[in-house]
């Protein structure tokens, strides 16, 4: 009985914490942007709202923080994404895929070196693990080719190898067990 009361109390505390955080963020987003940023500057706060100000946009006193965030996110893309998109437009498509493969092989080499030097893994397991880790790293890193097909291929190929290895191993174990 005591344990269930304790679990319910923790659950109520967690729900109230989440709801409190939701309403606090909602209240902060409804504050006017200009006066709030000026107040933070006057207090010499370590965190100000200057990074949210979109370049070339006039903000009057009635604009809320949520509206400024909406303007900022719809008007400009990510900085690194724009740089890589500019480079990828200059490179022919077959070379972008070659660059992507070289980038994947670089990550693979780094993970393979790490797994072989700092663990006691064998070459086969380290090879499969480093291929999967390289594919996951490649998925989250900006690359030269637009789209998700290359990302899915570089994650799917190691997964197919791992699943094929599991299938072969189970099949081999099934054959080794004598049937009585």
Image (tube, helix red, strand yellow):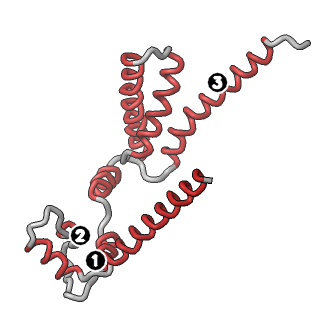
Dot 1 or dot 2: first in sequence order is 2
- Picture quadrant where residue 50 is located: bottom left
Is the residue 83 above or below the residue 72 in the image? above
The image position of residue 73, as x and y in percent, is 33, 69
Callouts 1 and 3 close, C-beta under 8 Å: no
Counting labels gives 3
Q: Is residue 105 above or below residue 176?
A: below
Frontmost residue, 39 versus 167: 39
* Nearest to the observer: residue 94 or residue 155: 155
- Residue 106 lies, in percent from the top left, at 36, 30
What x and y, as percent, mark residue 18?
44, 65
Assess disc 3: are there few (<14), some (14-19) or many (≥20) residues with their C-alpha within 10 Å of its C-alpha.
Answer: few
What secondary structure is marked by label 2? helix
Which residue is drawn at the image coordinates 37% and 23% (left, top)?
114
**Is 172 placed above or below 142 here?**
above
**Percent coordinates x, y for residue 169 in the rendering:** 69, 20
User: Which sits earlier in the primary sequence, circle 1 or circle 3?
Assistant: 1
Disc 3 secondary structure class: helix
Q: Which mark is residue 52?
A: 2
Tag 1 secondary structure:
helix
Asked whether residue 78 is in view, the answer is yes
Quarter containing the C terminus: top right
Please state if 126 lies on the left or on the right of 161 as rendered: left
Q: Mark on residue 65?
A: 1
Judged from this view, the residue extending furthest toward the right is 180
Q: CA distance from mark 1 to mark 3?
A: 53 Å
- The residue that disc 3 covers is 165
Badge 3 or badge 2: first in the primary sequence: 2
**Residue lying at 29% horizontally and 71% vertically, measured from the top left:** 72
Asked if residue 92 shows in the view, the reply is: no
Circles 1 and 2: CB atoms closer than 8 Å:
yes
Label 1, label 2: how far apart the Cα atoms are: 9 Å
């Amino acid at each position: 009985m005591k344990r269930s009361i304790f679990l319910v109390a923790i659950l109520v505390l967690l729900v109230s914490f989440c709801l409190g955080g939701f309403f606090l963020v909602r209240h902060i987003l409804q504050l006017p942007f200009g006066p709030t940023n000026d107040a933070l500057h006057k207090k010499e706060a370590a965190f100000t709202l200057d990074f949210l100000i979109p370049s070339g946009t006039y903000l009057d006193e009635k604009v809320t923080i949520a509206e400024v965030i909406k303007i900022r996110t719809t008007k400009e893309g990510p900085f690194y994404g724009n740089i890589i998109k500019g480079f990828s437009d200059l490179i022919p498509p077959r070379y972008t895929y070659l660059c992507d493969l070289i980038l994947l092989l670089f990550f693979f080499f780094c993970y393979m070196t790490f797994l072989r030097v700092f663990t006691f893994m064998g070459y086969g397991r380290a090879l499969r693990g480093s291929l999967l880790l390289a594919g996951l790293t490649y998925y989250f890193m900006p690359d030269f080719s637009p789209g998700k097909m290359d990302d899915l291929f570089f994650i799917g190929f190691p997964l197919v190898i791992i699943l094929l290895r599991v299938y072969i191993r189970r099949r081999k174990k099934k054959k080794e067990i004598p049937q009585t």
